[in-house]
Image (cartoon, grey):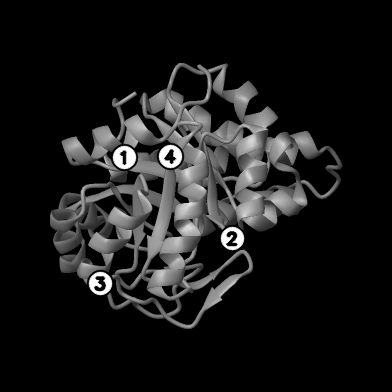
Amino acid sequence: MSLVTTHQMLTDARENGYAIAAFNCENMEMIQAILAAGQEMHAPVILQTTPTTLRYASAALFVANAKAAAEAVSIPVALHLDHGNSHALADEAVRAGYSSIMIDGSELSLAENIAFTKQTVDACTLLGIPVEGELGQVGGKEDDLEREGGGYTDPAEAVEFVAQTGVSSLAIGIGTAHGVYTTAPVLKPELVSALRDCVSVPLVLHGASGLGEDVVKDLITRGISKVNYATELRIAYTQAVRTFLAQNEGCIDPKKYGAHAREAVKQLVMSRIAICGCQGRA
């Protein structure tokens, strides 16, 4: 199947009370693992790449990989720019063939974030590409993004932000953080419910790696329609490579330890699809 946008995926998820699992990928093996898991569970999936990933390998290269892999499966697959931090990067991703864009102006003032986000929304709307914005900061470190703590999203500001920007989905701050949790996050799950009631677009949860299964399920019940996973996949891939090489010291074939890591990522992705409740939704 060709790459699709995230619009119908997230609309269906919001209307039917489940979430789409979105996975950050760093290489071909991770793309293969994510799509194999989705195919086996008949689940739509979102592939995501961050700005530093696109500095490591170009947007065009990731599009080529994603398109080839998507055409080999029968499930809906979207390719999404995660935490796009400039209009130039968003434009590069769109021109290369990304089917969904996130533009992150959450470190700006409300007025500046609205103006920054709307510029990308206006450009992408002409091409039928949905845009995710962010209001209220997600703490921790991911990519070049590092923040001391998570800022909670204000419902009144969220209403204004969605109305003024025209975003297709909204990443919200409820106390989660990117990276590995060293202390228990102070979450405000009731904020998800409040935001679900006051804005009309699907809500996105960042910083899900490390959260308990029951916590994520509760947030989905309250109104989260897209759950992002990144750090967990990197850990699973890297640990699998280390384990394989420790047990096979003479191995010099990247295909062998790559296949081992690919399977580890696939199993993790399947478990996260089950948590989000999107199995059988393809």
- Disc 1 marks which residue? 274
- Label located before the other in sequence (4 or 2): 2
In which quadrant is the C terminus drawn?
top left
Nearest the viewer among 204 and 36 is 204
- Disc 3 marks which residue? 154
Q: Which type of secondary structure does the marked residue at label 3 adopt?
A: loop
- Disc 2 marks which residue? 85
- Disc 4 marks which residue? 130
51 to the left or right of 176: right
For the residue carrying disc 3, how many other residues have a C-alpha within 10 Å: few (<14), some (14-19), or many (20+)? some
Mark 3 touches mark 4? (CB < 8 Å) = no
CA distance separating discs 1 and 3 = 30 Å
Q: How many badges with numbers are in the image?
A: 4
203 to the left or right of 270: left
Mark 2 touches mark 1? (CB < 8 Å) = no
CA distance separating discs 3 and 4 = 23 Å
Mark 1 touches mark 3? (CB < 8 Å) = no
